[in-house]
Image (tube, grey):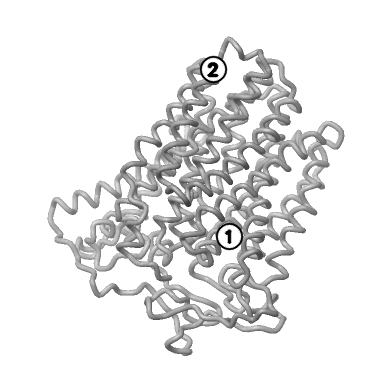
Amino acid sequence: MNFYIFQQPRRSETGLEVEESSVEETIVWDDDSDQLSFTTNWKLRATSLCALYTAQGIPSGFISYTLIAFFAERGYSAAAIGNMLFWVYLPWVFKFLWGPFVDTYHYLPMGRRRPWILTAQAGMILTVFIIVFIPSVEEKIFLLTFLLFIHNLFASLQDVAVDGLAVDILSPEEFGKINGFMFGAKRFGTMIGGAGIGVLIGSWGIRGGIFLMVPMLAMIMCLPLFFRERPGEKLLPWTEGEAVIKSSKSEKSKETGKMKDPEYVRGELSNENLIKALLIDFALLIFIFLFLKLTIGDIEVPILGEVPPHWLVWFIVLGPWSYFFYWAPVEEWDSFGMQFFCLSKERSDIVKALSLKAPLIGIILAMLTYFWEFLIPVLNVLFIQQLGWTDTEYVKITGGLAVTTAIGGTLLGGIIADRFGARRIASLFAVLTGLSIFTIALAEPLWNNRAVMTFLIVLYPFLGAAMGISLISLFMNVTWPRVGATQFTLYMALLNFGALFGLKMAGYFEENFDYTSTIMIGGACQLMIAFVLPFIDPGQTRRELGNEF
């Protein structure tokens, strides 16, 4: 795993160098005005990035609003709904594994990112198409969950490729504004999949609603299919064109691997430094253990008796971990902790970036940002099963009006984050989001007042969206372009891990706390973000490591 993520050489099918080894090398192409491309036409790249994010939002809105409200009305508990969402969205936690693929392997005649985008978008369409032809799929929960899991494998790959494209072709000054538009577009897709399709479920059924997504996703796929990443590239493998990413110093094709840093200074192999490195590795093992407990801890395996399956898998992981990282003499150890503290012979680029304070704090922020989403199944059960709302009524508000305000929050947050600074705006809206969630809890005497509750469940998505897009702009600022897809994808994966961890905890909160206390815990989680933000320096990464690919 360490080799796969951090150390494998970078390759392209053409053998051309991807411009990452020197600030003196540049990516060059001819600006052919007769050939539209993402890199030479601002409107086209903005439209395409937004449309591709809309494609992610449509199925997500259907799942997160329409589908779970459908199951809540049929008596499913918050724990059952949260568990289903956990498995459906699990691929988004592991999407950082797509990063090295997308950063490393290319078919450059069609562009650095476009082949990945087309492959992923086709997979998304195919999985939705398969679900349509399964009779009574809403009664086959396991099969539906599995197919949606596969769909999100492709959706997460599409997201990684699109994020990599955005990091490649956008300037730092555009991050906030374009990110606002992109995530606003994703919210728009969420509204289509939520309220748009949700109102038709009563007459069309689940399969009919899913079928509507197929032509929508296919139309969006036309943008990367019919427009090039750069002028002169191929539209398809059999059409005319050539790779235009090349070195300005030399046209010689070559393969580039992990570059040796002439300024790299190996740290002293003292006992103190070794203990620090081992503590990093131990923390990663604890993280793996907790993740295994979340995913397979509640599965009963008869042949294991009373032995929890996550313990067995964890001990299986310990074997290869120890062999690959610690079997050699201590001077040759190359674990994550050894690289982190400059104790290995070389240090990979991604570890070099994450060793800085700002990117490291970004990891903490990413895990905190969406942990509050344990409230999603809890509020579905509260409003539909306890307060008497129908699933259609609830989806019209949460998947329609609330998403509309979230789009406004996303656009507003992106614009003002560019003007006043992402960290400052994220802090402001983190506080406001936390207070708005607290207000829902404190308004318990008014829970049966639909006008008041509609206002409150529409307000916090607006504030939360502005906070979220500001944080994502901040993550882009602390991302090193040389490992753009890998590092930024890691942040996005941790955003999703925090959300899924929250969803998995929904059943715990449902069983051990009343609704008021659970909602207040969600508000407190948002306030914690505001306490962490002052410690991050948005400009540190590019100031210390540079701007080059």
Q: Position of residue 84 (x, y in %)?
A: 61, 35
The residue indicated by pointer 2 is 515
Q: Nearer the viewer, residue 300 or 80?
A: 80
Callout 1 amino acid: Val
Crowd band around label 2 with a 10 angstrom C-alpha radius: few (<14), some (14–19), many (20+)? some
The residue indicated by pointer 1 is 162
Q: Distance between the Cα atoms at labels 2 and 1?
A: 38 Å
Residue at image location 48% in from the left, 18% down from the top: 517
Q: Nearer the viewer, residue 169 or 492?
A: 169
Crowd band around label 1 with a 10 angstrom C-alpha radius: few (<14), some (14–19), many (20+)? many
Q: Position of residue 153 (x, y in %)?
A: 60, 52
Q: Quick check: 131 left or right of 188?
A: right
Which quadrant holds residue 289? top left
Callout 2 amino acid: Tyr
The number of discs equals: 2
Residue found at the very far right of the displayed protein: 203
Q: Quick check: 222 left or right of 233?
A: right
Which quadrant holds residue 431? top left
Residue at image location 31% in from the left, 43% down from the top: 535
Q: Position of residue 66 (x, y in %)?
A: 71, 34
Q: Is 477 drawn above or below residue 441 in the view shown?
A: below
Q: Is 397 drawn above or below residue 142 in the view shown?
A: above
Q: Position of residue 449 (x, y in %)?
A: 66, 14
